[in-house]
Amino acid sequence: MQIVRRIREWRYAGVSAAFAACVGAGLFLSGAKVGGVASFADISAAGAVGLPYSAAVFTGSLVRSIAAGTIGDNIVKLASLALIVIIKMFLEPRNDPKLCGINTAVSVLVSGAAVSAVIGELAHKLVFYGFYGGVAGFAAYSASRLITGLKKDRVADLSGTGGLSCSVVYIMAATSLCSLELPAVNIGIVFCGAVTLMGAYFYKQTGGVLCGALSVCGAFLASSAAGMSIVLLPAAGLLTGYMHNRKPQTAAAFFVGVCFVLNVLTGAALGDADSMIDIICGALIFMPLSGRFSDKWIRTGDDGTVMLPDAINARMGFLSDAVLDLRRESERISEMLSEGRDETREIEDNSRAVCSACYRRPFCWKSDKGNTLRGFRRLAEMAELAEESFPAELDDCLRKKELLAAFAESSRERAAAKLMEMRFSESRELLCEQLKITEELVRSAGERVDVRYSHSVSRSVRARLEKFGFAPSQVIAYYNSRSRLLTEIYFPADSAPVDGRRICDLIADELRLKMGCTEPVCTGREVRIRVFEKPRFTMEVCASSACADDSQENGDTHTVFTDGAEAGYVVLSDGMGTGRGASAQSSLVVSLFRRLVTSGADVGSAIKLINSVMVTDPQDESFATLDAVRIDLDDCGLTVIKSGAAATLIRHRGNVMKLTAPTFPIGIYGRSEVYVRECGFEEGDIVIMFSDGVSENAYPFIKELLLGGDDLRHIVGEICRKAHVFDHTLHSDDVTVIGIKVTS
């Protein structure tokens, strides 16, 4: 077992296995026949793969020709293979499917023409080699496209033109296998029977008919006898498609029975003893393979999975626009309500109250109106009203005391109105901010995600859970962009399991995969548990903390969690001050952030929503920093998220980078500030997060630690222990240091 493990962990194990497989393909395919002539399968295989692997196919074909003494008979094929390798070496820097097809077609045509010219049969065989090269080139293009899709997307695309490429490759595989002569069984018919049964069972009638028809085509290309022996295979696949919801053993027995009955009814050669043995062998192979089949590697282009996300996206987008329109209308009304005070109305009210009974009114407001109006305006603009500062324009006024009292009263009313307006304005701004958050949440929930839903996995997971007494309300299984399986299970709140470990174990046993799970997320009426195939990377996290000198409780709070989809999070919050109060504030921020993110909210909207909660806290001052690191566990991507937090140090490729964010903590004012930055990160790199208790004077010391070793626990412990040495302030603060490293 240790030897096998070492071979698997060997750096070049995959390349060596692929090289050996290509040598074997050359050995095997060089003896295959198509329509009674030498098959072009090995030529197409060499044209479809990269340079070293095409050389491996050539090597295998050459070895077989030498061993069998058929170099002269295979001279065109060997020359074509050699020319393919040479062209790939000099003229094909990238393995593009179109270039692969052209390279293969040209190599066959040139080699065939050269050999024909030497033996004096160029005129007779040029057309044949042109056709032969065209077919071989198209097969190479199809195989290269399939290989490229598997490398890039890790999935075989059976929809559209991708289905054509897969069909060509399958026909060539069936032809090559059927032409292989063995005394006991025909491997090609065994292979075709197993694939047809697989297609009928997992893709119903359509899959059975298509796989059966392609199998018959491949068999006929090998020989008419092989084709006639399975000519009714599409009909058997069609009827077996109706058994897709039965046990695999039942479907296999039904398939064999249908093949036999069709022979009896039609008198065809399907039931002949040898071919029936081959069909039975194919059914026996299907039964153990059916339990391991997964649509993870196959995309069929189901229109239903395309239309449904579009409809949801359209509805969510419309609802988001409606919330946006409501927010804009509320802002317009707020602006109307918060218009400035009307100074002219204040002057008219006071002049009416004071001057209406004065006999000098006609003189003041008619003969000397301009002077009087300037005096009244100066009174309205005065911050403090006193007889000493009475306007000179109103020296002849007979009712100075009454006028001062009236303007003093209106000044007090203005101040009270302004205070109320400020309070209402803050409330309206907070309401508008919350509407904006709602708008962003709705729109982000409706955004289409790059996933492929799997009905078969969803069905098998539900059946497994129900078998062991669980009653989920909904099971949704899908593959993400990296072809990693994720399953969301929803339970009613009154019948949900306490944790997801039992659910995770059952699903892992059913699917035979290494699975992990998130903690249950409850909405009050429903509980969701997300079970996921373990990603490529995992986080190694070490933390160390210390309380301030005069505190018994650390005011910093941190947590580590995964959203169950693709990312892991490390979150640190530093509450205002020290002690229990600071701890309560930071705990609130961390817990809200974790719950919102695991519920599906994006980071920006989650922080804005937390900020609105902190702003409405009844305490006079309630705020805390937020420092978060998001790591994509599929491709090791790093995202740093900050709101008023201390700097973050990142060791990447032998250098240490310092990240700071000029933002305010959460809860300072109504509009939150978020700093988000994506950084380069690789396996073995280290991130150091810390609270405000670590002074900037310690940064050179931390940099020296990061460049001096990889022991994460030692680095974190040293920073925490020596933080007080670099802190020259009178009052120490709580210290929390967190180190993160990604490993595979």
Image (cartoon, rainbow, N blue to C red):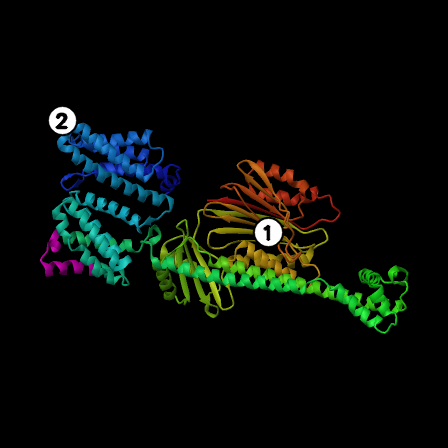
262 within the magenta span: yes
Q: Write down the quadrant of residue 96 in the picture.
A: top left
Q: Position of residue 183 (x, y in %)?
A: 14, 44
200 within the magenta span: no
- In percent of the image, x 29 and y 29: which residue is there? 86
Q: Write down the quadrant of residue 323 in the picture.
A: bottom right
Q: Is residue 650 left or right of residue 164?
A: right
User: Does residue 515 sit above or below 424 in this rendering?
Assistant: above
User: Dot 1 lies on which element?
Assistant: loop
Where's the N terminus, which quadrant?
top left
User: Does residue 633 sit above or below 249 in this rendering?
Assistant: above
Q: Position of residue 625 (x, y in %)?
A: 63, 53
Q: Position of residue 167 (x, y in %)?
A: 25, 48
Give the crowd class for mark 2: few <14, some 14-19, many >=20 residues within 10 Å.
few
Q: Is residue 671 left or right of residue 304?
A: right
Q: Is residue 129 left or right of residue 407?
A: left
Disc ID at residue 674: 1
N-terminal of the pair, mark 2 or mark 1, is 2
Q: Main secondary structure of the magenta part?
A: helix
Amino acid under disc 2: Ile
Highlighted range, magenta = 253-274
Disc ID at residue 83: none
Q: Residue furthest left?
A: 267
Q: Residue furthest top?
A: 118
Residue situated in front as seen by the camera: 431 or 741: 431
Q: Please say whether residue 616 is visible from this viewpoint.
A: no
User: Does residue 598 sit above or below 630 in this rendering?
Assistant: below
Q: CA distance from mark 2 to mark 1?
A: 78 Å
Q: How many marks?
A: 2
Which residue does the numbered mark 2 point to in the structure image? 119
Amino acid under disc 1: Val
